Amino acid sequence: MSNLMDIQNQIEKLQKQAVEIKAREFDKTVQEIRAKMDAFGITLKDLQFAKGRGKSKAAKSTGLKKRAKGAAKAKSTSTVAAKYRGPNGETWSGRGLTPRWLAALVAQGRSKEDFAV
């Protein structure tokens, strides 16, 4: 049975091997990706859209919709006004989980309405 030092040495060797393999295969992998991008006409902008920032070229040209019929609306990016303000200037809109500062004050017997803006 191996002891801890033997295992740590094995881990170190394997990590070095992994770094060497990654370094050797990195350029080849980048070339393969670029070749596929060229073959399909994919740009960096298309890749950004694929992260959910909008429609890709294919979706625009074919009229594909991003959401299924009846799917929920996209999230709003506007901020909500604070409904509660803590003694140290903390704020909470009243949406989502109760923040720790307010939960602690309520646990001490204070009312949530005491901190309403």
Image (cartoon, rainbow, N blue to C red):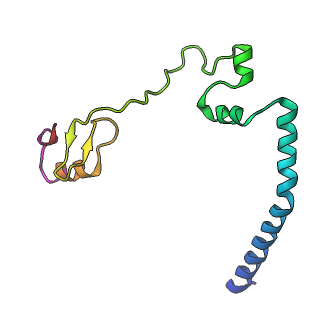
Q: Nearer the viewer, residue 41 or 113?
A: 41
Numbered-mark total: 0
Question: Is 111 on the left-hand or right-hand side of 38?
Answer: left
Q: Residue 52 is drawn in which quadrant?
A: top right
Q: Quadrant of residue 71?
A: top right
Q: In which image quadrant can residue 32 be found?
A: top right
Q: Locate the C terminus by quadrant.
A: top left
The image shows residue 91 at horizontal and vertical percentages of 25, 44
Q: Quadrant of the N terminus?
A: bottom right
Instruction: Check residue 51 for magenta coloring.
Output: no
Q: Position of residue 70 (x, y in %)?
A: 54, 14
Q: Is residue 14 left or right of residue 114?
A: right
In the rendering, at what x and y percent does residue 43 appear? 75, 34
Task: Using the image as rendered, state which of residue 26 and residue 108 is in the foreground.
Answer: 26
Q: Is residue 38 left or right of residue 83?
A: right
Q: What stretch is highlighted in magenta?
A: 107-114
- Residue depicted at 78% across the width and 32% down the height: 42
Q: Which residue is drawn at 74% across and 82% down?
A: 9
Please tell me whether residue 2 is drawn above or below residue 84 in the rendered image. below
Residue at 70% across, 20% down: 59
Is 88 drawn above or below residue 96 in the view shown? below
- Where does residue 15 sit, x and y in percent of width and height? 75, 71
Q: Residue at x 58, y 14 (%)?
A: 69
Return the residue nearer the eye: 35 or 98. Answer: 35
